[in-house]
DNA sequence: AATCGTCACAACCGCGGCTGC
DNA sequence: TGCAGCCGCGGTTGTGACGAT
């Protein structure tokens, strides 16, 4: 008996999302929160399957998503974490709260994989045997190869760290992640001043371009290459002043574009951490106007206060990498204590 | 100017885990 | 305990942008 499709194939729209669909989806989630995706298509009238709605939200519209170029810190984090965790993009993304797993996955596949294989090639030419290429380990082999993989991950991290030991940034990563050597009380991750593009910003950009360009224009271009003014509602004259092309690193201030509601129509919103809060609902009409009229820029400093949970293994790995001393016994000790199952 | 190849990324697909009944 | 439905994840595909020829 085959698994039933997640949604009716007939009448379900596929392909790029239009600005109208985005608005409808965001409006709905503003009111009801990002849950019960099954009900979203029927309640919104979107001819999309629930899965598509969820993906659109989590990968694109969700507040707090950072777009544009990956920073050096992020790049190194991804490399380290990939060596540590493998292709568990969701797990890796949990350490980079502003990036989606899809983003990280794409970045890995398009940039980092090539970069690392190039480094590997260079290393092999130089006689080095460093191994940073990801390994696929089947579940059955997992336990047997655990030690090897850990060692390889450790080696990869050590190699990465030693590649540019003079790089203060690298030191900063470790020190920021593990101040006082205790990951459980770690400071926030090394979030850099950067652009935090949220759904509202995206929507506004979409709308802006939508009205300027032909509808045939791709969402991708609309979302990343167009100019956008954060205060476009209040100051339409200033919309031409700033571009936010990802290749330029975009806006350099630590700002976050979120939804802001007037006291009367406030019913649900996301807080600074992007967490949805629903309050008494009393206004269901004209959500589009609500969105378009309430785009606002708010400080995003609180994001820096997020706690990054690191597992014992990661603590071990990073600490060990900093010391560049083999401590296999440490892991064996943990394994003997039966703690390894909690490591991943 | 047209064509082709490559790149980047949004979106889709299928599978597996989780949860409620 | 088994089943069905929902959700999340990772792999893959489709397509527009862009540069080279």
Image (cartoon, coloured by chain):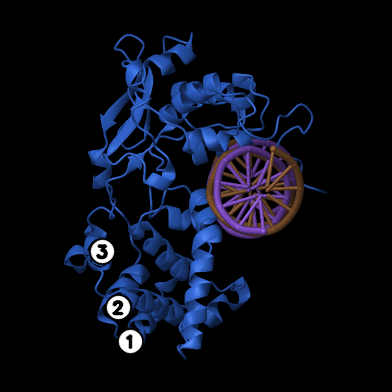
Chain colours: A blue, B brown, C purple
Which residue: 67% across, 32% down?
A49
Asked which quadrant contains residue A79, the reply is bottom left
- The residue singled out by tag 3 in the image is A169
Q: Are marks 3 and 2 in contact (CB under 8 Å)?
A: no
Q: Give how far across and how far down residue A173 sits, in percent.
A: 27, 63
| Above or below A309: residue A13 | above
- The residue singled out by tag 2 in the image is A320
Question: Is residue A210 in view from this perspective?
Answer: yes
Q: Give how far across and how far down residue A194 sits, in percent.
A: 31, 44
Q: Determine which of the numbered discs, if any, sits on residue A338 in the image.
A: none
Asked which secondary structure carries label 3, the reply is helix
Q: Give how far across and how far down residue A266 sits, in percent.
A: 35, 15
Closer to the chain start, of discs 2 and 1, is 2
Q: Quadrant of the C terminus of chain A?
A: bottom left
Q: Are marks 2 and 1 in contact (CB under 8 Å)?
A: yes
Q: Is residue A138 left or right of residue A267?
A: right
- The residue singled out by tag 1 in the image is A326
Which residue: 72% across, 34% down?
A7
What's the distance in space between the residues labelled 3 and 2, CA to CA? 18 Å
Closer to the chain start, of discs 3 and 2, is 3
Q: Is residue A245 left or right of residue A241?
A: right
Question: Is residue A28 in view from this perspective?
Answer: no
Q: Mark 2, residues whose alpha carbon is within 10 Å: few (<14), some, or many (≥20)?
A: some
């Amino acid at each position: 008996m085959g698994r039933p499709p997640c949604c009716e194939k007939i009448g379900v729209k596929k392909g790029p999302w239009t600005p109208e669909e985005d608005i409808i989806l965001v409006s709905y989630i503003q009111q009801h929160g990002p849950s019960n995706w099954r009900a979203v298509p029927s309640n919104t009238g979107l001819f999309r399957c629930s899965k598509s709605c969820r993906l659109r939200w989590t990968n694109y519209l969700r507040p707090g998503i950072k777009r544009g170029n990956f920073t050096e810190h992020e790049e190194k984090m991804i490399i380290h974490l990939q060596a540590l965790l493998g292709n568990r993009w969701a797990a890796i993304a949990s350490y980079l709260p502003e990036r989606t797993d899809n983003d990280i996955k794409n970045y890995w596949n398009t940039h980092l994989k090539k970069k690392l294989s190039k480094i590997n090639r260079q290393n092999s030419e130089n006689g080095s045997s460093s191994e940073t290429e990801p390994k696929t380990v089947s579940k059955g082999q997992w336990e047997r190869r655990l030690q090897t993989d850990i060692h390889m991950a450790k080696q990869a991290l050590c190699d990465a760290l030693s590649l540019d030991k003079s790089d203060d940034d690298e030191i900063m990563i470790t020190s920021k992640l593990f101040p006082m050597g205790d990951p459980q009380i770690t400071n926030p991750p090394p979030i850099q001043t950067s652009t935090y593009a949220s759904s509202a910003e995206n929507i506004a950009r979409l709308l802006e371009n939508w009205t300027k360009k032909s509808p045939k224009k791709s969402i991708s271009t609309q979302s990343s290459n167009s100019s956008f003014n954060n205060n476009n509602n209040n100051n339409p004259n200033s919309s031409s002043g700033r571009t936010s092309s990802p290749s330029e690193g975009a806006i350099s201030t630590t700002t976050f574009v979120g939804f802001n509601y007037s006291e009367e129509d406030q019913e649900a919103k996301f807080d600074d951490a992007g967490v949805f809060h629903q309050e008494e609902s009393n206004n269901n009409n004209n959500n589009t106007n609500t969105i378009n009229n309430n785009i606002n820029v708010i400080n995003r400093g609180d994001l820096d206060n997020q706690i990054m949970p690191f597992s014992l293994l990661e603590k071990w790995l990073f600490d060990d990498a900093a010391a560049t001393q083999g401590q296999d016994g440490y892991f064996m000790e943990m394994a003997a204590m039966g703690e390894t199952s909690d490591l991943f």
